[in-house]
């Protein structure tokens, strides 16, 4: 092989390596879906550019929260105004099915096996269970007062429902769909998430200005973390090392270190901030800012706001879809 040919191949290899490193540095691109209550739309944001790439109208009134199927093929938009859930094909962004739910359908969540959709209904104090293969309602489970959200443990054996009105968590056996126990939490129990290893369950209690940290194995409270300013939305980082909490009245995002169970940072953001989502790579955090009709993007490494993205009116719920699923 000639020296010139070797040099050429070497240059190609270097260019390929640089391209790969650039791709790694940029990370994956994702879509963030935002439910806008007052204009009944969903704003879709590209996380690589932090620009709006689409606005859709799924069909329900006052869309409140959004969840996704595990393969990324469908989005589920819960509507408090029409008591139903729109099933949207993410590729075409068209609604393919609408499921009746309970009163003021609030928080949708897909079971870990992908077979069912559970929807918390604060107006009827219950959870609607939908069979996603048959595309029909399977069950209705009575829970506490004003249930807001549903989260599942990693194995999909238990569901945890935050009940804001009764200030507790309903722990449900997913197979039998029966309540196992009820865990006391603060009034206004809302934002709920569980670490990937299943060792910590966190729930905000906005009415009493605190975040409760619970051991799911014992259903006992490990710690109550005080935080003034009405903590509301909450999400755990993908690596399980931190939790992020949106404080509605304080207009800050609190960063909780889960090893010490202490707030280590408060990041100023937006006005009447509500729900958060974190990208699967853990690098970006997005939070809805209701009084500014926008979404605030935060770099989790620098812990600084890097963008404010306009949305529809009264943005509330938010979720991240890996764009690679398209």
Image (tube, rainbow, N blue to C red):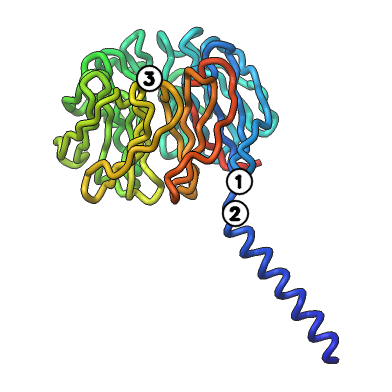
Determine if residue 136 is in view. no
Quadrant of the image occupied by residue 139:
top left
Residue 281 placement, left or right of 246: right
Residue under numbered circle 3: 120
Residue under numbered circle 1: 29
Q: CA distance from mark 3 to mark 1?
A: 30 Å
Residue at horizontal 53 percent and vertical 25 percent from the top = 76
Image quadrant containing the C terminus:
top right
The reply to whether dot 1 and dot 2 touch (C-beta < 8 Å) is yes
Determine whether 218 is above or below 132 in the image: below
Determine whether 38 is above or below 262 in the image: above
Q: Nearer the viewer, mark 3 or mark 1?
A: 1
Q: Nearer the viewer, mark 2 or mark 3?
A: 2
Residue at horizontal 61 percent and vertical 33 percent from the top = 45
Residue under numbered circle 2: 26
Q: Earlier in the sequence, mark 2 or mark 3?
A: 2
Q: CA distance from mark 2 to mark 3?
A: 36 Å
Residue at horizontal 42 percent and vertical 25 percent from the top = 273
Q: Secondary structure at mark 2?
A: helix
Residue 37 at x, y = what percent?
52, 14
Q: Residues within 10 Å of mark 2 (few under 14, many from 20)?
A: few
């Amino acid at each position: 092989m000639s020296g010139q040919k070797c040099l050429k191949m070497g240059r190609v290899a270097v260019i390929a390596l640089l391209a790969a490193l650039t791709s790694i540095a940029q990370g994956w691109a994702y879509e963030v879906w935002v439910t806008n209550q007052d204009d009944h739309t969903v704003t879709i944001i590209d996380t690589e550019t932090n620009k709006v790439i689409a606005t859709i109208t799924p069909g329900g009134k006052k869309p409140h929260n959004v969840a996704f199927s595990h393969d990324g093929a469908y989005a589920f938009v819960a509507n408090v105004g029409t008591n139903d859930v729109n099933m949207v094909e993410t590729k075409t962004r068209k609604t393919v099915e609408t499921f009746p739910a309970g009163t003021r359908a609030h928080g949708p969540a897909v079971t870990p096996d992908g077979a069912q959709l559970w929807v918390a209904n604060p107006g009827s104090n219950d959870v609607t269970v939908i069979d996603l293969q048959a595309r029909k309602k399977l069950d209705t489970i009575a829970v506490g007062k004003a249930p807001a959200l549903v989260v599942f443990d990693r194995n999909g054996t238990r569901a945890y429902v935050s009940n804001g009105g009764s200030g507790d968590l309903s722990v449900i056996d997913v197979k039998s769909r029966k309540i196992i126990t009820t865990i006391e939490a603060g009034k206004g129990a809302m934002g709920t998430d569980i670490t990937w290893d299943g060792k910590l369950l966190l729930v905000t209690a906005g009415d009493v200005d605190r975040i409760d940290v619970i051991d799911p194995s014992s259903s006992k409270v490990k710690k109550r973390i005080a935080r003034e300013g009405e903590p509301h939305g909450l999400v755990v980082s993908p690596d399980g090392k931190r939790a992020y909490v949106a404080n509605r009245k304080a207009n800050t995002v609190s960063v909780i270190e889960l090893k010490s169970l202490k707030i280590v940072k408060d990041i100023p953001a937006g006005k009447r901030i509500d729900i958060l989502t974190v990208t699967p790579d853990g690098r970006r955090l997005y939070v809805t800012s209701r009084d500014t009709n926008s979404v605030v993007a935060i770099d989790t490494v620098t812990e600084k706001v890097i963008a404010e993205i306009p949305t529809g009116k009264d943005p509330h719920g938010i979720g991240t879809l890996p764009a690679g699923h398209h």
